[in-house]
Image: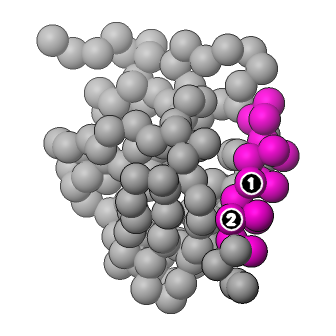
Amino acid sequence: MMPDQDRTNGDGIPSPDSGRAAHEPPGRRIRLIKGGALLLEPNGFRIIATRGFKRSPSKSYESITHIAATRRALLVATTSGLIIIRASDFPDPVTGPESARTAFLDFIRARPDGEFGLRRIARLESFGQQ
């Protein structure tokens, strides 16, 4: 059965901001190559693998401990592990990881508890620098 077209982004994948509350930031879809995407949804984020056939479980923003962009990848550390999205998975491998990092941080900042979340990430990152 096909998803409701009003709640999809046109390719059968539910729109990241479907059903969001008024105080939550709208969802954001960051395109990856071969039909994949990084979805920043109101309650968490997930990766859609190549051609949209496989979705990762949703991870809460509260679980993020570090977000880094390197020449080779976007790294998202969570309390349960490390998510690596290779630079070559972005349409523009040169700017993709840093653009995605900025989008992640902007999305977290726009949440009702965003400033608290950013302070928590900064505090945890400072421990790593000691």
Residue 72 in the image: above or below residue 21: below
Q: Which residue is drawn at 61% across and 18% down?
A: 20
Distance in Å between CA atoms under marks 2 and 1: 6 Å
Amino acid type at circle 1 is Arg
Using the image, tell me which numbered label, if any, was put on residue 98. none
Q: Give the range drawn in magenta.
A: 111-126
Instruction: Please give the name of the residue rendered at 74% of the width and 54% of the height, measured from the top-left corner.
Output: 120
At a point 50% along the width and 88% down the height, the residue shown is 71
- On the rendered image, what quadrant is the N terminus found in? top left
Query: Can residue 86 be seen from the camera position used here?
Result: yes
71 vs 21, left or right, is left
Using residue 92 as the reference point, say whether residue 14 is left or right of it: left
Residue 105 drawn in magenta: no
Tell me the residue that label 1 is attached to: 120
* Cβ atoms at labels 2 and 1 below 8 Å apart: yes
Name the residue carrying label 2.
124
Q: Position of residue 75 (x, y in %)?
A: 48, 70
Q: In which quarter of the image is the C terminus?
A: bottom right
Provide residue 98's location: percent of width, then percent of height.
61, 73
Q: Is residue 28 visible?
A: no
Dot 2 alpha-carbon crowd within 10 angstroms: few under 14, some 14 to 19, many 20 or more = some
Residue 12 x/y as whole percent: 29, 27
Identify the residue at horizontal 45%, vertical 13% (top origin): 6
Q: Nearer the viewer, residue 115 or 96?
A: 115
* 76 in relation to 9, above or below: below
Residue 93, picture quadrant: bottom left
